[in-house]
Image: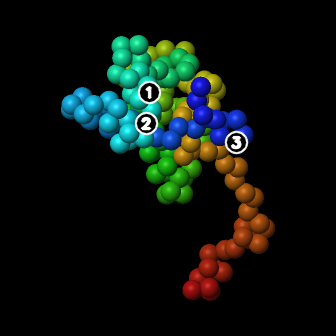
Amino acid sequence: MPKVEEGGRYSKKYSEQQLQSALKTINDGVPLREAARHFSIPRATLQFRRSDKFTKISPGPPPILTSTEEELLVKWVVENAQKGFPRRKEDLQSAVKSVLEKVPRKFKDNYPHEGWYKAFLRRHTILSIRTPEAVSSASSNVSEKDIRKWF
């Protein structure tokens, strides 16, 4: 039974990177118990990960785009936002459509639907939906003459 912290949620005390390092040291000849003690990973976890029964899968259907393509999309959205040109949902969907026109995949008409968009945002938490603020009337009434006078 896994150890449960306060609030009833289980949390691992090790990262996937630590686990991969431990598995690599075991493959290099270090005994399993010693690697488990050194990396603070349960011996049973290491034993299971080395077995043929373990396969790393993600829940749900596989993504349509590759992880490289998705990372390029995220980079494109972030760079545009930093330059002052935030991208809308429709912009992202049309960008995906242009990628899929080169190599057709599962989308109807090669256009991603609402479900794909929501899942994409869940997979890439660096992105979020923002609502723009209204510009005050004082700011909107500033003319070029006022700006030149300011400087």
Residue type of the residue flagged with mark 2? Ile
Above or below for 82 versus 114: below
Q: Find the residue positioned furthest to the right.
A: 137
Q: Residue 6 has which mark?
A: 3
Q: In the shown orientation, is residue 83 left or right of residue 143?
A: left
CA separation, marks 1 and 2?
7 Å
Expressed as whole percent of the image width and height from the top left, the position of residue 60 reads 56, 19
Residue sitting at x 59%, y 25%: 1
Q: Which residue is mark 1?
A: 45
Mark 1 Cα shell of 10 Å, populated few (<14), some (14-19), many (≥20): few
Q: CA distance from mark 3 to mark 2?
A: 21 Å
Residue at figure coordinates x 53%, y 37% from the top left: 12
- Rendered image quadrant of residue 27: top left
The answer to whether one can see residue 109 in this image is: no
Residue 79, above or below 98: below
- Badge 1 amino acid: Thr
Query: Where is residue 91, by image quadrant?
Result: top right
- Left of 12 or right of it: where is 46? left
Between residue 18 and residue 91, name the one nearer to us: 18
Sequence-first disc among 3 and 1? 3
Q: Are marks 1 and 2 in contact (CB under 8 Å)?
A: yes
Residue 82 picture location, percent across and down: 50, 57
